[in-house]
Amino acid sequence: MGRSDWRSEYSFGGHAEEMLGVMQKAGFFDGGAKPALIAHSFGAHSATVLAASHGDKLSRMIMVDTGMAPGKHPSSSTKRRRYKTLGDALSRFRLSPPQNCENPWLVDEVARHGLVEDPDGFWRWCFDPDYVSKLRYSNSFEALPQSRCPLAFVYGEQSELTPVRIREVQQAQAPAGTTFTGIPGAAHHVMLDQPIRLAETLRALLAAS
C-alpha cells in the first residue's frame, strides 16, 4: 500500500482494473482453476466492482469485515508526518478504527511494512496522505447484486464496523446464496486478532468454491 507511485486521482473502478492487471501479469488465469479474491475492509469496495465487471474470471470473492453500506463515504484525512527514527514512527502506529490486539508482534510487522526511509534519513508512511481527497468515490454497495461470481462475507464478531444492522443491509443487497461467517474473538482487524481462525475459515470457503 503506497510503495508504487501515487496517482493524481483514484477510483474504485481504477483499482479494480489494476487488480485484474496484477492477476493477469501473475498468471492467475493461466491454469485450469479460477482464482479467488479476498478483500479486507475498504478493499472490498474495489473488489465488489471487479466482481461485477469481471467476476466470471473468479471462482469466488470473499470480503473480510467490510462496513460497506448505502451512503457510507470515507472522510478521514492523513497529515504528512515524518519521523527521525524508525522507533519514533513505530511508536505512532495505530489501528483504524482503534482497537486492542492480543498479538502485538503482528501489529508491529504491519507497521514496519508500512514505513519507508527517505533519502534524508527520515521515516514516513508509504501511503498517499492525499488519497481520500483524490478519490472519485462511487457507492460500490450498489454493485453487490451485479456480482458475476459467488460472494462470501466474513466478519469479526466484536467489530464496530459490522454490527447486526450493517450485516442485515448487506444480506438484503447481496445475491442469493451469499454466506456470512462470524469469527469469535475478533474485531475489525480479523487477521491480527484471530489469524488461525481466519485462515481456517477462508480455507473452508475456498474448498467449497
Image: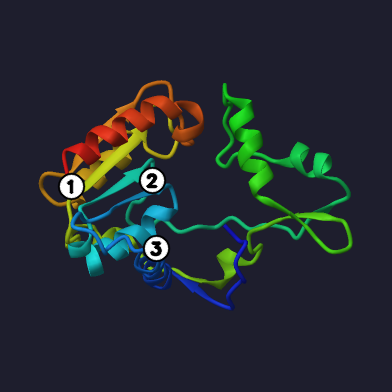
| Disc on res. 26 | 3
**Vertical order, 200 against 152 (above or below):** above
Image x and y of residue 195, in percent: 45, 29
Quadrant of residue 95 within the rendered picture: top right
Query: Distance of mark 3 from mark 2, alpha carbons?
Result: 26 Å
Residue at 37% over, 72% down: 17
Residue at 39% over, 68% down: 25
User: For this view, does 95 lie left or right of residue 160?
Assistant: right
Quadrant of residue 3 within the rendered picture: bottom right
Q: Earlier in the sequence, mark 2 or mark 1?
A: 2
**Vertical order, 6 against 95 (above or below):** below
Q: Earlier in the sequence, mark 1 or mark 3?
A: 3
Which residue is at the front of the view, 28 or 67?
28
Helix, strand or loop status at disc 3: loop
Q: Identity of the amino acid at label 2?
A: Thr
User: For this view, does 63 lie left or right of residue 146?
Assistant: right
Residue at 64% over, 67% down: 130
Q: Which residue is mark 1?
A: 172
